[in-house]
Image (cartoon, helix red, strand yellow):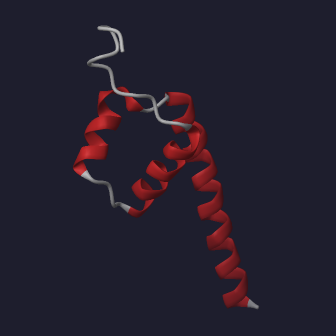
C-alpha cells in the first residue's frame, strides 16, 4: 500500500452496495458499516443505481401483494 491509500477506505463493489442499500431499506445497519459508508466507502453512482433498483423491487412486491389481495 502507498501512503496515499493508508487512510482511505476501500470502495465497495456494486453488489456490496446493493446489500448495504437493502439493509438500509429494512433499517438495520451496523455503526461500523455506516461509518465506512460515511467516510467515502461507497461510489455515489452505485448508491443511486442500487436505490432505484431497490425501489423498483419494493414497488413490484407491493403491487404483487395488492393484486393477490384484490383478486
Horizontal side of residue 7 vs 1, given as left or right: left
Taking 7 as reference, is 49 above or below it? below
For residue 33, what is the image quadrant?
Answer: top left
The location of residue 16, given as percent across then percent down, is: 50, 45
Residue sitting nearer the eye, 2 or 20: 2
Quadrant where the image shows the N terminus: top left
Q: Residue at x 35, y 36 (%)?
A: 37
The location of residue 39, given as percent across then percent down, is: 30, 28
Taking 21 as reference, is 13 above or below it? above
The location of residue 29, given as percent across then percent down, is: 32, 55
For residue 7, what is the image quadrant?
Answer: top left
Q: Residue at x 63, y 50 (%)?
A: 53
Q: Residue at x 49, y 29 (%)?
A: 43
Number of marks present in the image shown: 0
Residue sitting nearer the eye, 28 or 67: 28
Residue sitting nearer the eye, 69 or 56: 56
Horizontal side of residue 42 vs 49, given as left or right: left
Taking 14 as reference, is 5 above or below it? above
Amino acid at each position: 500500500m502507498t501512503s496515499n491509500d493508508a487512510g482511505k477506505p476501500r470502495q465497495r463493489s456494486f453488489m456490496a452496495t446493493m446489500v448495504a442499500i437493502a439493509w438500509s431499506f429494512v433499517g438495520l445497519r451496523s455503526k461500523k458499516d455506516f461509518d465506512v459508508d460515511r467516510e467515502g466507502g461507497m461510489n455515489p453512482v452505485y448508491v443511486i443505481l442500487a436505490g432505484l433498483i431497490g425501489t423498483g423491487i419494493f414497488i413490484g412486491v407491493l403491487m404483487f401483494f395488492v393484486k393477490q389481495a384484490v383478486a
